[in-house]
Amino acid sequence: MTNSNGWPQVALAEIVTPVQRSVPVVPGQSYRTLGVKWWGEGAYERKTIDGSETAVKTLNEVQEDDLIINKIWVRHGSVAVVPPEVAGCVGSNEFPTFECRRDCVLPRWLHWYSKARELWQKCDALSQGSSGKNRIRPEKFLTIKVPLPPLDEQERIVARINHLAQRIEEAQGLVHQSDKLSDSLLMAIYHEIVHGAPRLPFGDVAPLTRRPAEVDPSCEYPQVSVRSFGRGTFHNPPLHGCDITWQKPHLVKDGDILVSNIKAWEGAIAVAGPADDGRYGSHRYLTFVPVEGVATASFLCFHLLSPEGLHCVGEASPGSADRNRTLRSKKMLEIEVPVPAFTEQQRFGRLLARVDAARQIREDAAKSRTALLPSILDRAFRGEL
């Protein structure tokens, strides 16, 4: 079989060979274990274990340029070519390993093909079982056919993919640098305006304001939630009134400071925007409304997400286990926050809005660049690159 470019479609069994480099497991000795990420994201070193931590008698060592799969998750793209930093790691029999025949295939060709959607689809079709136990048998995996141009053509196309992938990575790196510079600029201006500013309890400048819904069983209540690490709000499917019991939702309005009382300590704090107005937060969300002329929501939110602010919020969220770290609203209201001149806060808010708008443009562009690589690979393996 050939593709539209005349390349043969060759079974993996013809270009890779199963290999098993058994390493005896001995208590008291250390073993670097590996994993294979989903969707072609590659092999990685997981953790180092002692031989006493596993019941298996042997593990299998991998070397650079081996082709490796996870039998269960290969249907989700858990296939990779081993990079240098993972060489020498070990895995269980759940990770069949194969050596590339370098006389007919470049490991880098298979590296890029491991990131191609068509390979994942072929693996999914051959996986057997039910639920989460859809393992692929190694002999079945080896029946998968891959496009195989001559070695010189493989080299040319791999070089082209490498070049384009590097350009995408460089662009993403520039975005990251730009974000860091923006954050540094904002923090510098923030420190400038809070220097010497009076401090007041949070409750004096943004009192807790609860607007419990009058639940109608025949109505729907659109939801709003807050991501951790200061990543803003998002929307969940609406709640049906007939499904709401004692945990009544609370109305959220544009300009509220919305705080998750179970994840506040890790930055689940945001300002509700126009798209959030009229939605409802669960009983787990606290809404605070800044006093007009005293404080702005954007400035207070920025402070709460600063290192100082998160420390104070963490202190107001006692407990050692994640699920037990619940923010105490009374403690939250007692946190002292800087209150610079209202005009300074407004100026900072305008700057913050411009930075956020620029960041959103960069994020949208980054998503487009991320989608480029799958498109490049699709073209490459159709012989169109």
Image (cartoon, helix red, strand yellow):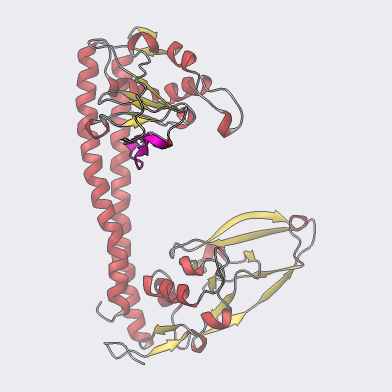
Please tell me how many numbered marks the rendered image carries.
0
Q: Residue at x 32, y 78 (%)?
A: 381
Q: Main secondary structure of the magenta part?
A: loop
Residue 238 covered by magenta stretch: yes
Q: In this view, does 312 lie above or below 65?
A: above
Asked if residue 91 shows in the view, the reply is yes
User: Which quadrant, please, contains the C terminus?
Assistant: bottom left
Q: Which residue lies furthest to the right in this view?
A: 27
254 relative to 14 in the view: left or right? left
Tell me where residue 208 sits by quadrant: top left
Asked if residue 226 shows in the view, the reply is no
Q: Residue at x 58, y 71 (%)?
A: 63
Q: Which residue is drawn at 45% across and 16% down?
A: 332
Q: Which residue is drawn at 31% across and 52% down?
A: 172
Tell me where residue 370 sits by quadrant: bottom left
Q: Is residue 281 above or below residue 375?
A: above
Instruction: Tell which of 154 and 71 is nearer to you.
Output: 71
| Residue 67 image point, x, y percent | 52, 74
Instruction: Tell which of 59 and 11 is nearer to you.
Output: 11
**Which portion, as a residue range, is magenta?**
222-242
User: Which quadrant, please, contains the N terminus?
Assistant: bottom left
| Residue 217 image point, x, y percent | 36, 33
162 relative to 384 in the view: left or right? right
Q: In this view, does 24 lie above or below 337?
A: below
| Residue 204 image point, x, y percent | 36, 8
Instruction: Tell which of 4 and 306 is nearer to you.
Output: 4
23 relative to 201 in the view: left or right? right
Residue 4 covered by magenta stretch: no
